[in-house]
Image (cartoon, helix red, strand yellow):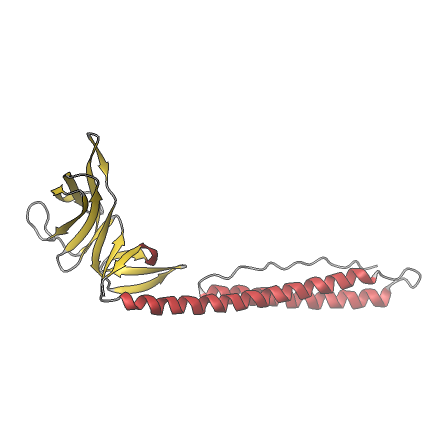
Amino acid sequence: MISLPTTSASIKAPTAAAGSAASATGSAQTSLTNNYNDFLKLLMTQLQNQDPTSPMDTNQFTSQLVQYSSVEQQIATNTSLTQLIQLTQGGEVLQASSLVGKPVTVTSDRIALQGGKGGLQFDTPTAGPVSIGVYSDSGVKLREAVVDSQAGRNTWSWDGQDSQGNAVPDGAYRTVVSGQAGGAAQSLPFTVSGTSTGVQKSGNALQVQLGALKVDLSAVQSLTP
């Protein structure tokens, strides 16, 4: 007597990459088709060779057919979801492209130097000195400035020069803003401003470019028309 096979198919969730999603769906469909054909062959063989005095339980192979149908529906649903995600992401890119060429303010730990200019904003609860340090990727301090801040919103503009007065190439430079609180220095949150130069998709997220600086679209705080 030939026993019925117990077969399961692995359904992979769709990813943002169209090639990966199509490959996963195609693989699942191929696997399902091959397993289903093997199942039918074994089922027919068992029906032809079953013991007439002890016929096969019909509920067993009916359950198998239902499982195959359910898996097939899941694959079709995953394919539809993949297409929907791709269309949605395409629409988001088109919408985000309206930012290109416009001044934006974003949250980042780096200042964008574009055309030899950069700017940032920070808030302080009280007036007092605030230290701003600009660093290279290797950790070298390029520029340090001390600003006499006012209570509330403050701005600082960088002329693109280091502490020796040398011009620094355009790029994205790590920045630290610190002030005094209770006699101790503490880091202050800040935002940076610049001109959006592009939009790109990175994995499942959209990124806005300010020259060499790249931030997620969710980091955009304001847009100046």
Q: Relative to residue 76, is residue 122 drawn left or right?
A: left
Q: Position of residue 45 (x, y in %)?
A: 80, 67
Q: Is residue 114 left or right of residue 86?
A: left
* Quadrant of the snapshot with the C terminus: bottom left
Q: Residue at x 88, y 62 (%)?
A: 55
In this figure, what is the number of numbered marks?
Answer: 0
Q: Residue at x 16, y 43 (%)?
A: 132
Nearest the eye: 82 or 138: 82
The reply, left or right, for residue 80 in relation to residue 139 is right
Residue 20: x %, y % from top left:
48, 63
Q: Quadrant of residue 41?
A: bottom right
User: Residue 50 lies in what quarter of the image?
Assistant: bottom right
Nearest to the observer: residue 116 or residue 40: 116
- Residue 56: x and y in percent read 85, 61
Quadrant position of residue 112: bottom left
Residue found at the far right of this picture:
53
> In this view, which residue lies farthest toward the left?
165
Q: Residue visible at 66% across and 58% down? A: 8
Q: Look at 71% across and 64% down and name the residue there.
A: 66
In the image, residue 182 lies at what x, y percent? 21, 30
Q: Is residue 219 above or below residue 32?
A: above
- The N terminus, quarter of image: bottom right
